[in-house]
Amino acid sequence: MPNQDDRTPEEAAVQPSDPPTDNAAPAITDAQPAEPVAPTALPPGELPADTNPNKKRKCALFLSYVGHGYQGMQRNPGAKTIEDDLFNAITEAGGISEANADEEGFKKIHFMRAARTDKGVSAVGQVVSLMMVVNPPGIIDRINAALPPAIRAYGYRRTVKGFDARKACDKRRYEYIFPVWMFDPKLEGIYRPKLKKIDTSEEGAKEDDEEEEEIDIDIDEAAREEDAATAEGTNLPSAGQPYGSDSTFVFDTDCINRLNGILSHYQGTRNFHNYTIRVAASAPQAKRYIHSVVCDGVFEINGTKWVRTVVIGQSFMLHQIRKMIGMALAEFRGVAPEGCLKHALGTFHLAKTPMAPDLGLFLDECYYEAYNNRWGHQNEHLQLSDWQGAVDEFKKEKLYPALAKRDLEENTNAIWLYGLKDSTYKFSEWLDRGDSAKGNRGGSDGGDRGVGKDQTKRPAPGGSANGGGGSTGQEADKKAKLDSRHAGNMSLQAEYSE
């Protein structure tokens, strides 16, 4: 090996005379600089640190409310709604700036509810998406301080920017509860001092001649029925007693099984045009998918036994659940002949179905399974169970007692039950017409088929559309007129949940 002193002048000029040390600077080369190192991914559930504490963040807000006294969830000019009180409370708490505290601001913050509960309907698991200022900490406490007692916010979760509480909701769970005595076939009397008029025509919705009519309970007729019931030995409640307090009816396992058998006809994809208003049988939105609808047993509210039913579906039309429950109760009590409920699901038939009171219905939970599967690794999961203790307390201490108190004071269920008669809804008549039409169609009731206007047979001059009785042709003609009337003016009710 040559000695360092034996190097040529040229070698000495380019090679160091001393060996490199650990502190020597790295050699400069012609190599391209390395690509910037990507930032380390955040742990699951952790969000980037806020750079602007006053910046609006997309959030999912979870809340409950008692719907009595409100005209529904969704904002409606001139009406008292849940959203108005909620929006004002968030603004007062600093979650919405004063610049956005108007109708235009409502749109700018992308406010959207998961379900549009109807007039008088309550909610335990409602979800709202919006752009909200979440700092300084304590925003939920400040919102609750500004809310009326009927509304309670539980908390929020940060979401992806494009999150929409309505569109991202996979399915919705509702509960409907009613007193056990409503199933008692022997309890028919009406308590006269509490009796008052009731409108069971879809909350007074203005219908055409073929649609729902207002039902007014005649006081004199009710008095006569009460006297007759008393003469037959039926015990009526005294002042201050809840209607049905003397009933000894037991809603046992056989009753649960029987009710579940009736409710099972709703499961799956069905045509619910007879279970809403102003929707033609041929309209696409009349078809709905019901995951499950079951009786979940009996429980107590302040010493009174109530029956709980649970309905889970993708989405519901206006008044759909109340009509489903009303029709099921009519068939259970024998007011409607067996098979009426299934008949009303047939797309060839027009049927006037009873609508149960709003008192017992509430939104129990909204599910976001697809969102959680897609974005759960980046953001927190959206699930009501994160506040389960507070939710259970709201139901037990506020919602259930409020519903029972209202029924005691107003006799809402008793008055509705009085109007549940065959003479009111003509169950036997439209069931007979359906049987006649079924025979003329060769045995098909059209229960699960969508029928367009072009498929509806029009009656030939002077005769029936099906060659049978004239009533069948008149019904087909009536349906065709309704389809034509609504074809150009159909409101999309895909997410109008009650």
Image (tube, rainbow, N blue to C red):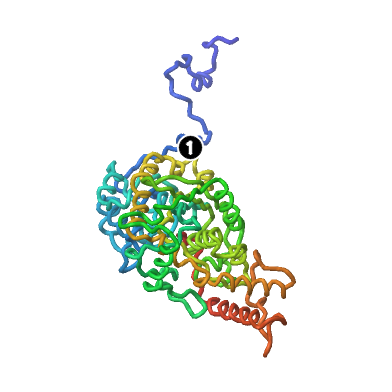
Q: In which quarter of the image is residue 300?
A: top left
- Residue drawn at (44%, 65%) of the image: 418
- The vertical placement of 1 against 176, above or below, is above
The percent coordinates of residue 353 (x first, y second) are 52, 67
Query: Would you say residue 164 is visible in this rendering?
Result: no
- The vertical placement of 418 against 485, above or below, is above
- The vertical placement of 283 against 124, above or below, is below
Out of 194 and 57, give the one closest to the viewer. 194
Query: Would you say residue 21 is visible in this rendering?
Result: yes
Q: Give the position of the C terminus as an image quadrant.
A: bottom left
- Residue drawn at (73%, 69%) of the image: 443
Label 1 crowd (10 A; few <14 / some 14-19 / many >=20): few
Residue situated furthest bottom in the rendering: 462
Q: How many tags in the picture?
A: 1
The percent coordinates of residue 157 (x first, y second) are 40, 44
- Residue drawn at (34%, 48%) of the image: 398
**Does residue 99 appear left or right of residue 401 in this picture?**
left
Out of 427 and 386, give the one closest to the viewer. 427
The percent coordinates of residue 242 (x first, y second) are 36, 54
**Does residue 136 appear left or right of residue 6 in this picture?**
left
Q: Which residue is denoted by mark 1 in the rendering?
A: 38
The amino acid at mark 1 is Ala
The percent coordinates of residue 187 (x first, y second) are 46, 58
Judged from the image, the secondary structure of the residue bearing numbered disc 1 is: loop
Q: Quadrant of residue 137?
A: top left
Residue situated furthest right in the rendering: 442
- Residue drawn at (49%, 52%) of the image: 172
- The vertical placement of 477 against 321, above or below, is below
**Does residue 404 appear left or right of residue 265 in this picture?**
left
Out of 153 and 480, give the one closest to the viewer. 480
